[in-house]
Image: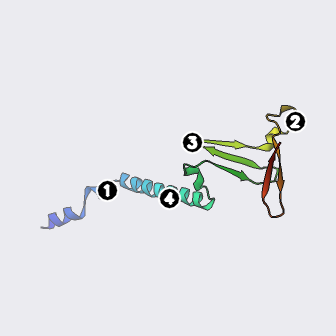
Amino acid sequence: MRSRRHSLLRRSEDNDPMSVVSNLFDVAMVFAVALMVALVSRYNMTEMFSQEDFTMVKNPRKENMEIITKEGEKINRYTPSEDTDPSSSKGRRVGVAYELDNGDIIYVPE
């Protein structure tokens, strides 16, 4: 009877040092996923995971402004400060945009 009780208390799993490592890995993975979900919801980046196309302006009217567009699976990033040389223009003027007092922007094609 004593040897049976003694064998029930000592299992082979209790002496396995790798079981601690696997438990730590599971905890780290749960933490990493929770951190990614928190960051995506904090910075309102849920549009990146949707199927819809969108355009986002980051830091508007500042030196480090960026325009980020998503078209299908492709995400493009454009920084206007990269094109400061007028001789290397990549486009042509197609219209004029006016900003009203209430913040609306009206585009007038030429």
Residue 14: x percent and y percent? Answer: 30, 59
| Label 4: few (<14), some (14–19) or many (≥20) C-alpha neighbours in 10 Å | few
Q: Amino acid at mark 2?
A: Pro
Q: Residue 73 — which label?
A: 3
Question: Residue at left 72%, top 53%?
Answer: 58
Q: Measure how far apart labels 2 and 3 are at the Cα level.
A: 32 Å
Q: Height in image: 33 above or below 109?
A: below
Q: Nearer the viewer, mark 3 or mark 4?
A: 3
Which of disc 1 and disc 3 is earlier in sequence?
1
- Return the residue at label 4: 31
Residue for point 79% across, 35% down: 91
Residue 40 occupies quadrant: bottom right
Please tell me the numbered disc located at residue 86: 2
Q: Which residue is mark 1?
A: 15
Looking at the picture, how far across and down is residue 110, in whole percent? 83, 42
Of mark 4 and mark 1, the one earlier in the sequence is 1
Residue type highlighted by circle 1: Asn
Vertical order, 90 against 45 (above or below): above
Q: For marks 2 and 1, give the one nearer the viewer.
A: 2
Q: Position of residue 46 (x, y in %)?
A: 58, 55
Number of labels in the image equals 4
Circle 4: element type: helix
User: Label 4 vs label 2: CA separation?
Assistant: 49 Å
Q: Quadrant of the N terminus?
A: bottom left
Amino acid on which the number 3 mark rests in the picture: Glu
Q: How is the image coloured?
A: rainbow
